[in-house]
Amino acid sequence: MARLIVMGGGVSGHTTATFAKKWLGDEHEVVVVTPNANWNWIPSNIWVGVGQMKKEDVIFPLAPVYEKAGIDYRQALAVSIHPDGKDGSDKPYITIKYTGQGKEGQTEELEYDYLVNATGPKLNFDATPGLGDGNGQIGPHTVSVCTADHAAHAHSELMNIFEKAKTEKQKILVGTGHGMCTCQGAAFEYIFNIEHEAKKAGVRDNLEIKWISNESFLGDFGMGGLHMKVGGYVVSSKLFAESLYSERNVPWIIGAHVNKVEEGKVHYELLDGTMGEEEFDFAMLIPPFSGVGLKAYGKGGEDITDKVFAPNGFMKVDADYTAKPYEEWKASDWPRTYQNPDYKNIFAAGIAFAPPHIISKPMKSPNGTPINPTPPRTGMPSGIIGKAVAESVTSMIKDGPESAHIHEASMAEMGAACVASAGKGIFDGQAAAMTVYPVVPDFEKYPGTGRDTDYTFGEIGLAGHWIKHILHHLFIYKAKLKPGWTLIPE
Amino acid sequence: MADIKAKEEELNFTKEQFNLTMIPGKFARFLRNCVIYQFIRFLIINLKMIIVVRKSH
């Protein structure tokens, strides 16, 4: 009997664990280690953040689902990896620290045959002074929609602002809280939901809603922007995004590295080196992401974290990490199998793998401050990668490591669908439905724009709302492993 | 003399930051919320997304 340990129970980890268990059956063991008690459909956190959904609508408990699937669930934090074993044993293992199941604070060693790191990101609020509380959590000055709890809190704060806006002017600031953030899409969706709800509440005229982000142009989205088919034209996402902001009277500050947050004010540096300040009554700023801080140790207890992980804390996989100038970046730099180069029984899936470089053109202010979005890894790529890794591990266990078929899922060969809503109604509000193919541009295959414009498109309208509703219910249904779940694509 | 009002879609062009983009007019806004048109677009967008999903696996 082989044991697969999946660290992380988010989109990628849950996909890996559930498919691996289905394919491996009871002959082999699948263990999930995650500090969370609940699974969260993160895209719908936006609707929680404006009060269109309850927190309970976007989460469900993991324990009964894993019990039904026959997966050994440990509500615990993965602390360290020991891929060479320890003195007296060659068996690799990880150490975990429980956060639930009545064992809070207890530590344990778990041996593995195969390990998948799907720990996702650490929300690195403390990278910006004042954005965090100094203990790794969000600070008191801003809100976030990164977790269901954060989103519920954001809604409560937003309602206070709407109440005040009935009688006085209020300033709302939404965007990124650091020069190296990703996930602009979430902030983009949130700002337009706020704008939509403000109109519905009759307080829009008393709200100044402003966007701030590290993108060098609106519509970069961490993918260097994209060119998409809109209304028969191939247009830049810059024009698409600027149109959305202009139509809704939402001005923007771009190329901004937020370097300090205090009560009611952010300080920022722009790409041209100038410094600025922006006041707010309510701010939702996405934090930068980093690896979760896993350590790795050799057989003798020596620290080998640098061997297994990149400096940003994400795990090294089969990407080309050679430092090279932007002009030499290629689609083939991106990983295909997500297998660690030194330990073939370790994989990283979803946000946990270290990208070879960013996708957007790297930028620095004259002061040397890097200000550029980092690569997005949304639900669809995370799910696809998770499934490919599950297939690879299953083959390694069933066919043996030497004759196994290692599956591939390069982000330079996969697309992503994104539906950014503004409102939630069936007959009111609008949503921007976008697809991009591939996520990482391939200028050798698509010399014009780096992408296939037949399948990279954007459209605004009610249809996007309907799709977002369907995706919400479909993916929660799938994650609960209800009948036919394997038929629903990632 | 009665006040002359700008068309809704043209109001925001008066702000410098918004001046160099495109803003949808009345007909485009109507189509965005027209249930029949959106139902057709819904089918087309879904079809395209399914193709993208298939190409990605």
Image: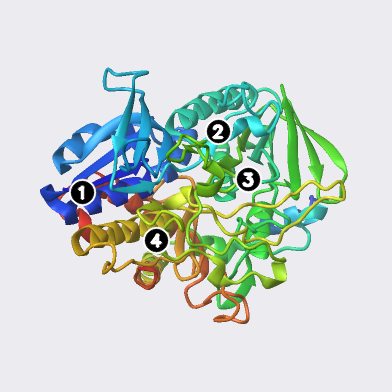
Relative vertical location of residue A315 with respect to residue A264 in this rendering, above or below: below
Task: Name the N-terminal-most of marks 3 and 2.
Answer: 2
Label 4 or label 3, whichever lies nearer to me, is 3
Q: Amino acid at mark 1?
A: Ala
Q: Amino acid at mark 2?
A: Ser
Tell me the crowding category of disc 2: few under 14, some 14 to 19, or many 20 or more residues within 10 angstroms, Cα based: many
Residue at mark 3: chain: A
Residue A148 visible in this rendered orientation of the protein: yes
Residue B35's disc is 4
Tell me the crowding category of disc 4: few under 14, some 14 to 19, or many 20 or more residues within 10 angstroms, Cα based: some
Q: Amino acid at mark 3?
A: Cys
Q: Residue at x 31, y 46 (%)?
A: A14
Q: CA distance from mark 1 to mark 2?
A: 40 Å
Task: Name the N-terminal-most of marks 1 and 2.
Answer: 1
Q: CA distance from mark 4 to mark 2?
A: 34 Å
Q: Amino acid at mark 4?
A: Val
Residue A144's disc is 2
Q: Secondary structure at mark 1?
A: loop
Q: CA distance from mark 3 to mark 1?
A: 39 Å
Tell me the crowding category of disc 3: few under 14, some 14 to 19, or many 20 or more residues within 10 angstroms, Cα based: many
Label 1 or label 4, whichever lies nearer to me, is 1
